[in-house]
Amino acid sequence: MKILVTGSEGFLGSEIINALSKRKISIFGLSKNKKKNKNNKYKLINSNLLNLEKNSQILKSNKFDVLIHCAWYTNPKDYLHSKKNTEWLKASKKLIDEFYRYGGKQFIGIGTNAEFNTSNKKNKVFEKKFSKGAETLYGKSKSKLNNYLLSKYKNAKWIRIFWLFGKNEKKERFLRNMISIFRKNKNFFLEYPSIKRDYISTEQAAKLIVDIIFKKKNGQSFNVCNGKSLSLKEIAFITKKQIKSGKLILSNNKDNNEIIGETKKISKFTNYKNYNVREDLINHINHFYK
C-alpha cells in the first residue's frame, strides 16, 4: 500500500507520518518545505499544492492507494477569513479528482468543527456526513470540500479536527504563546477564560486518524476530538502550575461558549479509551514546549 500525506511537514501532517511509520506500508509526503529531520520514515516530494499541473503529474507517476489531505492555509493571524481559502478549495478539488483519475482508492479529507454554526451557549458537533452553517470563509471552504468529496466519491472519508496542541506548534497559537510569556516571567492576559473547547494533541489526533483509515470500513464522516471540553482558564492554570513563573491575569469576560464533538464512531478505539487530555497536556508542556 502506498499512502501520500499532503502537508507532511506541518503541525498535524508530521504526526500522521509518525503514526503511519509504525505500519508496513510505503509512505510519501508532499510539502513545499524541505524536510526538517533526516529519517527514513517516508519519501518527501517537494511541491506546492497550488501548482495544479505538477501535482497531477506526481499522482499520475506514483499511483497512490490512499491520500491524506492535511495541507491548507493555516496562518493563525488570518486563516479564518483569508481569501487564500478559496485558492485552497479550488486546488483541493483538483487534487481529489486527479487522485481518483489515476487509480486512487481512498481520499481522506481533513476538515474542521468550523464547518458548523457554533454560536450557541452549548454546541455539540455531530458526525454528520455533510456540513453546513459555517460562519467563516475557512469553515465555508472546508464545508464545500466536504460536500464535494463525499457526494462524488463513495469510498472517501472526511475527518473533522477540533482544537489541537502539540510539537512544532506555531508561536502565535494559544498554548505556545502562553507558555512563552510565562517562561519570560511576564504577565499573560486571558481574554476569554470561561469559553470551553474540545482539545487533543496532534499526536493523539494522528493515532485516531490512522485508526479510522485502517479500522473503520463504514461511515464517511468522523470527528477526531476528545469528546469533552476544557475551559481556557483550566488550561491556563495547568500551564501556570507547570511553568512556575510569570503571572496569569483573567479578564471579566463572561462568555462561556462551549464546543465539543460527538465521538460515537471512535469510542471503541483503544487509543480513544486510554486517552487523558490533562496528562497529555502536562506531558507536552514539560517535554515539547521548550
Image (cartoon, rainbow, N blue to C red):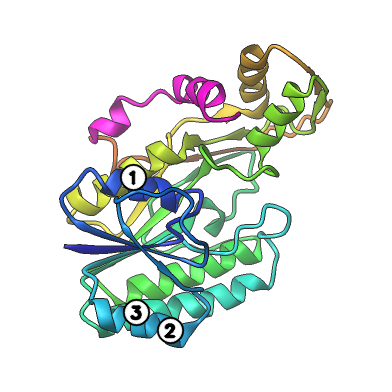
Q: Which residue is mark 2?
A: 54
Main SS, magenta residues: helix
Residue 285 within the segment the image draws in magenta: yes
Q: Is residue 61 visible?
A: yes
Location of the N terminus by quadrant is bottom left
Q: In the rendered view, does 107 fall on the left or right side of 230? A: left
Q: Quadrant of residue 156?
A: bottom left
Q: Secondary structure at mark 1?
A: helix
Q: Residue sitting at 66 percent across and 16 percent down?
A: 243
Range of magenta residues: 269-290
Q: Which residue is mark 3?
A: 58
Residue 118, how many percent across, how many down?
60, 49
Distance between the alpha carbons at the discs numbered 3 and 2: 6 Å
Q: Residue sitting at 66 percent across and 42 percent down?
A: 173
Distance between the alpha carbons at the discs numbered 1 and 3: 22 Å
Examine the rendered structure and indicate whether residue 94 appears above or below residue 268: below
Q: Are marks 3 and 2 in contact (CB under 8 Å)?
A: yes
Q: Residue sitting at 42 percent across and 57 percent down?
A: 8
Q: Secondary structure at mark 2?
A: helix
Checking the image for residue 18, the label placed there is: 1
Q: Badge 1: few (under 14), some or many (20 or more) residues near its Cα, within 10 Å? A: some
Q: Earlier in the sequence, mark 1 or mark 3?
A: 1
**Residue type beneath disc 1:** Asn
Q: How many marks?
A: 3
